[in-house]
Amino acid sequence: MARVLIVEDDAQTAAEIAAALGELGFDVECAYTGREGLLKAAADKYEAIVLDRMLPGDLDGLAVLSTLRAVGVDAPVLILSALSAVDERVRGLRAGGDDYLTKPFEFIELTARLEVLVRRRKAPQRETMLRVGDLEVDLVTREVRRAGRVMELLPREYRLLEYLMRHPGQVVTRTMLFEEVWEYRYDERTNVIDVHIGKLRRKLEEGGMPSMIQTLRGSGYVLRAAE
């Protein structure tokens, strides 16, 4: 039974989400403030977190999310928000969110999105190590090394790199990355992929290391071993 934490200040909304998830067999707990949600999420293990973006007080949803990622909590997070602008969705993804659902929403969509996040987290990994040239990713410990140097990646950067390394030498389009890494349909109005690719590229090239990620204008990206 998957454990899910709902962080939502509106008690009725939290209760309705909990009821919908409970009918599907989820083990649900609720928190009603950012501080309470942060403490619960950091102290216990959950397969997923449903996080309201507009929490009252000194810890809103993005502050909670950023803090959780900073302390190593990697449970997938579905952000709920009445803010539907592209910039707001990008902010949520940049802060470490795994999915973003705008209010008002249909419970059937919320539960479907959450099931995808939980299923992805529980899926067994057949491989334990990915290697492309001098770049290595340990799929068990999630440690990333280039030429023996350990790299610190954010959760989204790690997932992006893992996807690229599973397709070495292949052209990976923005649509593929958006649908597989963000689990969204590609939105041409957002530059979130370019932003994350840029950050990942800088980390891979730190210390003067040769480039591995190539941008093919109008096509996408290719990860190749450095020559």
Image (cartoon, rainbow, N blue to C red):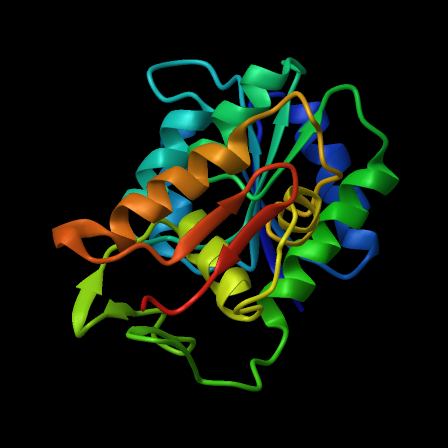
Residue 192 x/y as whole percent: 53, 31
**Residue at x-position 42% and y-position 21%:** 60
**Residue at x-position 18% and y-position 50%:** 206
Q: Is residue 17 above or below residue 10?
A: below
Give the mark count.
0
Q: Which residue occupies the extreme front position in the image?
A: 227
Q: Quadrant of the C terminus?
A: bottom left
Residue 145 x/y as whole percent: 25, 69
| Residue 182 at least partly seen | yes
| Residue 32 at least partly seen | no
Q: Quadrant of residue 226?
A: bottom left
Could you say which is closer to the camera, residue 224 or residue 184? 224
**Residue at x-position 51% and y-position 28%:** 92
Q: Is residue 44 above or below residue 156?
A: below
Q: Is residue 142 above or below residue 59?
A: below
**Residue at x-position 66% and y-position 54%:** 180
Q: Is residue 108 above or below residue 44?
A: above
Residue 65 x/y as whole percent: 41, 36
Residue 77 x/y as whole percent: 54, 44
Asked if residue 142 lies left or right of residue 109, the reply is left
Q: Quadrant of the N terminus?
A: bottom right
Q: Quadrant of residue 199?
A: top left
